[in-house]
Image (tube, rainbow, N blue to C red):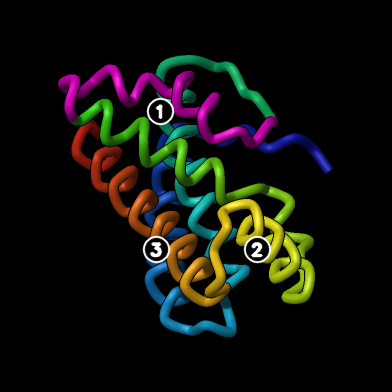
């Protein structure tokens, strides 16, 4: 199969489409893993939209913090907004991994349990809800800011 060359508009549209998918997915706890995965892909697409808008460079790695830096999206905002974005990206990057596409429900719970132990939390469900809310909130902010500066 030939390599596809996506434009910045393709990535931007994909980001908004994945965001609409996420809005539906996160209402169903049976889609928990896929909704977290989709949140990360939504963010990644937004950053790739900005990267390909300004350069022809394509990095196949999926590190949200590095993609955010390359996207230059943060540079378009004042210091307070840039700080909010940076915090959101760090939270999302801490929760999301492109490898989630391979995770079973059992594997995901094991990952969450390990994080739960390291965080010294006793209520696994509270931890899970905190993780979900953090990535969904981060996604919402990043998409909002990405749309705000898109021309």
Query: Please, what secondary structure does the residue beneath circle 1 have?
Result: helix
Q: Residue at x 37, y 19 (%)?
A: 72
Contact check, label 1 and label 3, Cβ < 8 Å? no
Give the quadrant of residue 80: top left
Contact check, label 3 and label 2, Cβ < 8 Å? no
- Of label 2 and label 1, which has the lower sequence position? 1
Q: Nearer the viewer, mark 1 or mark 3?
A: 3
Q: How far apart in space, not on screen, are marks 1 and 3 (Cα)?
A: 25 Å
Query: Considering only vertical position in the picture, is 127 above or below 147?
Result: below
Q: Is residue 12 left or right of residue 44?
A: left
Residue 133 numbered tag: 3
Q: Observer-nearest residue: 146 or 74?
A: 74
- Of label 3 and label 2, which has the lower sequence position? 2
Q: Residue at x 74, y 51 (%)?
A: 99
Can you identify the residue that label 2 sits on? 112
Q: Is residue 109 magenta?
A: no
- Of label 1 and label 3, which has the lower sequence position? 1
Residue 113 in picture, x, y percent from top left: 68, 65
Query: Considering only vertical position in the picture, is 81 above or below 23?
Result: above
Q: How many C-alpha atoms fall within 10 Å of the one at disc 3: few (<14), some, or many (≥20)?
A: some
Which stretch did the figure color magenta?
Answer: 61-80
Tell me the quadrant of the picture where the N terminus can be found: top right
Q: Residue at x 61, y 33 (%)?
A: 63
Tell me the quadrant of the picture where the C terminus can be found: top left
Residue 90 in picture, x, y percent from top left: 46, 36
Residue 50 numbered tag: 1
Residue 87 in picture, x, y percent from top left: 36, 36
Q: How far apart in space, not on screen, are marks 2 and 1 (Cα)?
A: 32 Å
Q: Nearer the viewer, mark 3 or mark 2?
A: 2
Q: Residue at x 55, y 17 (%)?
A: 56
């Amino acid at each position: 199969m030939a390599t596809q060359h996506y434009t910045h508009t393709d990535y931007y549209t994909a980001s908004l489409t994945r965001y609409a998918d996420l809005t539906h997915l996160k209402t169903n706890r049976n889609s928990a893993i896929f909704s977290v995965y989709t949140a990360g892909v939504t963010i990644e697409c937004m950053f790739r939209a900005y990267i390909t808008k300004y350069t022809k460079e394509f990095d196949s790695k999926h590190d949200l913090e590095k993609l955010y830096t390359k996207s230059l999206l943060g540079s378009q905002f004042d210091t307070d907004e840039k700080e909010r974005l940076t915090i959101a990206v760090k939270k999302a990057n801490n929760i999301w991994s492109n490898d989630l596409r391979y995770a079973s429900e059992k594997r995901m719970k094991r990952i969450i349990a390990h994080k739960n132990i390291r965080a010294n939390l006793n209520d696994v469900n509270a931890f899970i809800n905190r993780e979900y809310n953090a990535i969904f909130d981060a996604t919402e902010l990043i998409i909002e800011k990405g749309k705000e500066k898109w021309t």
